[in-house]
Amino acid sequence: MSMNAGSELPRFFRVRQKFARPRIDDLVARVHEELSVACQQPIQGKTVAITAGSRGVANVATITKACVEFLKGQGALPFIVPAMGSHGGATDEGQAQVLESLGITEASMGCPVRSSMQVREVCQAAEGFPVYFDQHAMQADWVLVVNRVKPHTRFAGDIESGLMKMMLIGLGKQRGAEVYHQVIQNYSFDRIVRSVAKEVISRCRILAGLAILENAYEETADIKGVAPELIETEEPKLLRQVKQWMPKLPFEQADLLMIEQIGKNISGTGMDTNVIGRKKNDHVAIDGDSPDIHHIYVRGLTEATHGNASGIGLAELCHRRVIQDMDAQVTRMNCITAGHVTGAMIPIDFETDREALTTVCKISGYKSPEHVTAMWIQDTLHLEQIECSEALWPAAEQQGLEVMQPPRPLEFDSSGDLISWF
């Protein structure tokens, strides 16, 4: 099953998966409806800080503007604050630029955007560390916390990434993010996020939370307004719902997962550990993690990640262009702040895809190339269509997966790189 002269590699076929697809048609109406129930405080004439994160949240500009319009309709004076820890190079201008890249500007939102890395110390948490909060949000009469609820890439529990993490890491800016990631080495993430959120809710005038839920196709599946006193009890319910909608790989084991691109707009770790099965260990599935992927090969970075290759350390192999396109300083700062220094480690790199894939076949065990199990994905968000090596054909038939293209040799260009199908 040689693909080209002098190179024996497995043939690949393409399958299509189908996932649940709940969607909201009228986002603005839903935002207004949910906020009208969740916001129970008098806000006429009051300033309200609206949080805006850096993740690739679907329809984030539309949802954020809908929040602005709702608050204005209630006679409030809204403004937007970046709530993204150390992202954007941990600078005022950098974080404002991240929001601009998402379509969130003063002109588009119709309200001020106040970006600052300065924080104020709110109090000491019960565990004995300081609680920090964005200075502009601290000066506001009220704060509306807006964020997507989804599984965290490193921590597992009833509360992972969502409204409470936004109050902890996002509004804590770089200073808070560094402290909290340090403290998490001594206490569980669940304990710290609950401890900090409790103090923030009681001391920082949280108006409400607006939780965004997405389906497997990166579409807004639901939006829920949550009163501040209910955030701790409601967020776990929302997380359980999101986990049911999450996309996943079709097979539980593979010698190789080839990823076309990783980036911060895809996941906090560049590639979602909930998808690749490496949530508890960078290089192996342990303690119930699934799937079991032996080697990961990364072909490139997304344009939107701007050189931030955080999470590249989870891969064993990568194309040389990943190293060339990586902003080492930004990547290191992000991983150090997150307390995940191994996420910035450099995998072995290859000048061509052909060399990388040939190597994978040699290190996949005592088997011929046609028996190597492999999957090739665009990224960990887009899992509807997947290229699979021919060794997975029986498993695909057993699952009844839709086959879009039969087994065929991969195509390379004259330099030895794959001709991408994405």
Image (cartoon, rainbow, N blue to C red):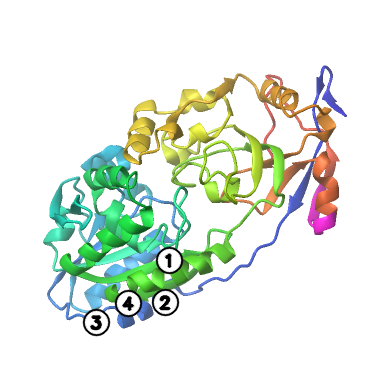
- Earlier along the polypeptide chain: callout 2 or callout 3? 2
CA distance separating discs 4 and 2: 8 Å
- Give x and y (percent) for residue 163: 35, 63
Quadrant of the snapshot with the N terminus? top right
Please give the count of numbered marks on the rendered protein. Answer: 4
Amino acid type of the residue tagged 4 in the rendering: Leu
Residue under pointer 1: 212
Secondary element at tag 1: strand
Amino acid type of the residue tagged 1 in the rendering: Ile
- Give x and y (percent) for residue 204: 17, 65
Q: Would you call the spot at circle 1 few (<14 residues within 10 Å), some (14-19), or many (20 or more)?
A: many
Q: Would you call the spot at circle 3 few (<14 residues within 10 Å), some (14-19), or many (20 or more)?
A: few
Secondary element at tag 2: helix
Amino acid type of the residue tagged 2 in the rendering: Arg
CA distance separating discs 2 and 3: 17 Å
Residue 156 left/right relative to 354: left
Residue under pointer 3: 40
Q: Tell me, for residue 368, which label it has, or none.
A: none
Task: Give the residues drawn in magenta, as a range.
Answer: 398-405
Residue 32 left/right relative to 236: left
Residue under pointer 4: 35
- Earlier along the polypeptide chain: callout 1 or callout 3? 3
- Earlier along the polypeptide chain: callout 1 or callout 4? 4
Comparing 188 with 402, the one in front is 188
